[in-house]
């Protein structure tokens, strides 16, 4: 499979100024050369050069497209194979014609993520770096992008490699004592094992401590905007999105469905869900909207519970406060520019003073206080540490937890003076689990599953 030549469109489909078709494999230059007409044959040009010309239909010689062709010979390319990138006019017809000619003249259509898969299989990047490519593409904030960039450069890989190296040294020490038991001092060996396991456990704990924050920065917080009708939920969405995404009127029940919008609040990506006002209603359509609101409420990581500060708390709002007491809630008291009738003590008692934010969405007041409240809940007041080695991938988190469990078992066994050859099994298991993060000893089915998440052309 790795010997054939693959091709795919590397840019999004649709109309645009430029589109790029990527070709990779042993015959990438030869296949492209059959179609290209320019001053020089592509087979004779130096690597990492760009050439102007035309794509012609080989049998008829008819010009099909005006192009710029970039030639990158392996191993100095993304896949470590010969790579050709053809830049043509963006558009459904032009791009499809060029790709079809490539497929007719010796290339095969690439599978999703196959270019990155080849980069991994050819040893240019490890598995965690390959997965970071997905995160780069899907990043929803500058911070998420920077974290993914760090991981693609190998920041996590280096941490894992160092950990595994220390475990190899520990296993070598144990192996020597197994082979030469007459020189072993049991108490010293067990103490050495405990020290090394404890140091490795501390490193894993530090990585796992970033997991929740990393996952938030990678995927965003699902944030439901909840409250009774006409308290300012849609105004809050529009203010955070900085555009009119939801209809705002004085008529109760305007929002009938869940309106979604991605926004950044102090660098934290939020998937905002503006919901219908939760109340008893006889309107059939509004009733469906209220049910959707309750579903959004159950799925949310964060709830922005909005109140009208110019009115006292209603009985239904008090019930909502009780119902959400154990959830991650920020109470937003809107319309503070009007004479206040809402008593804040009840909300402060339920959620805490730092989670009650007074706002005037009409006057755009209180946004920075809301940002601080969100950062305080999920990032202990600080969104980003200096070390950007965040663990955000669910697979990595699972493997780190497995390695932690193995090393805990090894530490406990050393404390109980269990035979060291038995302890070595747990240490080896931890070493293997860490290796799976960077792609050592992973199954072919797992590799295929990971790269199937990529888009075509990547």
Image (cartoon, rainbow, N blue to C red):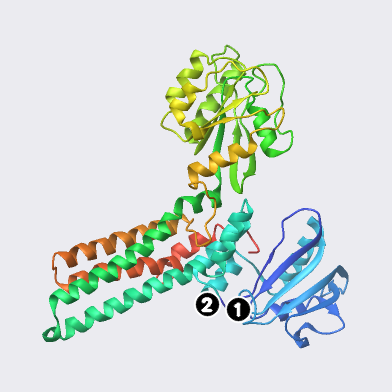
For disc 1, the marked residue is: 80
Q: How many marks?
A: 2
Q: Is residue 336 visible?
A: yes
Question: Split into 4 quadrants, where in the image is the C terminus?
Answer: bottom right
- Where's residue 125, x and y in %? 54, 73
Q: Residues within 10 Å of mark 2 (few under 14, many from 20)?
A: few
Residue 322 drawn at (x, y percent)? 43, 23
Marks 2 and 1: CB-CB under 8 Å?
yes
Binning the other alpha carbons within 10 Å of mark 1 as few (below 14), some (14 to 19) or many (20 upward) gives many
Q: Position of residue 210 (x, y in %)?
A: 46, 55
Circle 2 sits in a helix, a strand or a loop, which is it? Answer: loop
Viewer-side residue, 306 vs 126: 306
Q: Is residue 111 left or right of residue 56?
A: left
Q: Earlier along the polypeptide chain: callout 2 or callout 1?
A: 1
Q: Is residue 421 visible?
A: no
Q: Which mark is residue 123?
A: 2
Residue 101 lies in quadrant? bottom right
Of 271 and 209, which appears nearest the observer? Answer: 209
The residues bearing labels 2 and 1 have C-alpha atoms spaced at a distance of: 8 Å
């Amino acid at each position: 499979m790795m010997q054939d030549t693959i091709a795919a469109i590397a840019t999004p489909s649709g109309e645009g100024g430029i589109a790029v078709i990527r070709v990779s494999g042993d015959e990438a230059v030869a296949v492209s050369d059959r179609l290209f007409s320019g001053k020089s044959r592509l087979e004779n040009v130096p690597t990492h050069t760009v050439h102007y010309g035309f794509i012609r239909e080989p049998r008829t010689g008819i010009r099909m497209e005006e192009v710029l062709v970039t030639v990158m010979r392996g191993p100095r390319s993304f896949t470590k194979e010969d790579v050709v990138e053809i830049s043509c006019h963006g558009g459904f017809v032009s791009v499809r014609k060029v790709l079809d000619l490539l497929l007719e003249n010796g290339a095969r259509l690439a599978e999703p993520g196959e270019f990155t898969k080849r980069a991994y299989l050819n040893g240019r990047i490890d598995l965690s770096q390959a997965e970071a490519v997905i995160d780069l593409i899907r990043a929803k904030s500058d911070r998420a992008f920077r974290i993914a960039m760090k991981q693609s450069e190998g920041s996590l890989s280096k941490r894992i490699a160092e950990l595994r190296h220390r475990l190899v040294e520990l296993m070598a020490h144990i192996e020597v004592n197994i082979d030469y038991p007459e020189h072993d001092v049991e108490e010293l060996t067990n103490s050495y094992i405990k020290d090394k396991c404890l140091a490795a456990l501390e490193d894993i704990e530090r990585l796992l401590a970033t997991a929740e924050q990393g996952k938030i920065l990678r995927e965003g917080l699902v944030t439901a905007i909840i409250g009774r009708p006409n308290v300012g939920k849609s105004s809050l969405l529009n203010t955070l999105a900085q555009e009119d995404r939801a209809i705002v009127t004085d008529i109760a029940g305007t929002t009938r469905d869940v309106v979604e919008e991605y926004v950044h609040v102090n660098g934290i990506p939020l998937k905002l869900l503006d919901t219908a006002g939760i109340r008893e209603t006889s309107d059939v359509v509004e009733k469906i909207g209220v049910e959707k609101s309750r579903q959004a409420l159950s799925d949310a990581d964060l709830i922005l519970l909005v109140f009208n500060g110019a009115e006292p708390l209603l009985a239904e709002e008090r019930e909502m406060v009780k119902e959400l007491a154990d959830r991650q809630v920020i109470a937003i008291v809107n319309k503070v520019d009007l004479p206040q009738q809402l008593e804040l003590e009840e909300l402060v008692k339920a959620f805490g003073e730092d989670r009650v934010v007074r706002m005037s969405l009409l006057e755009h007041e209180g946004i920075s206080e809301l940002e601080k409240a969100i950062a305080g809940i999920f990032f202990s007041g600080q969104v980003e540490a200096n070390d950007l080695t965040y663990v955000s991938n669910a697979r990595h988190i699972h493997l780190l937890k497995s390695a932690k469990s193995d090393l805990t078992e090894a530490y406990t066994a050393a404390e109980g003076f269990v035979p060291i050859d038995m302890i070595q099994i747990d240490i080896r298991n931890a070493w293997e689990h860490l290796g799976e993060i960077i792609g050592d000893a992973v199954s072919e089915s797992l590799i295929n599953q990971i790269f199937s998440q990529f888009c075509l052309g990547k």
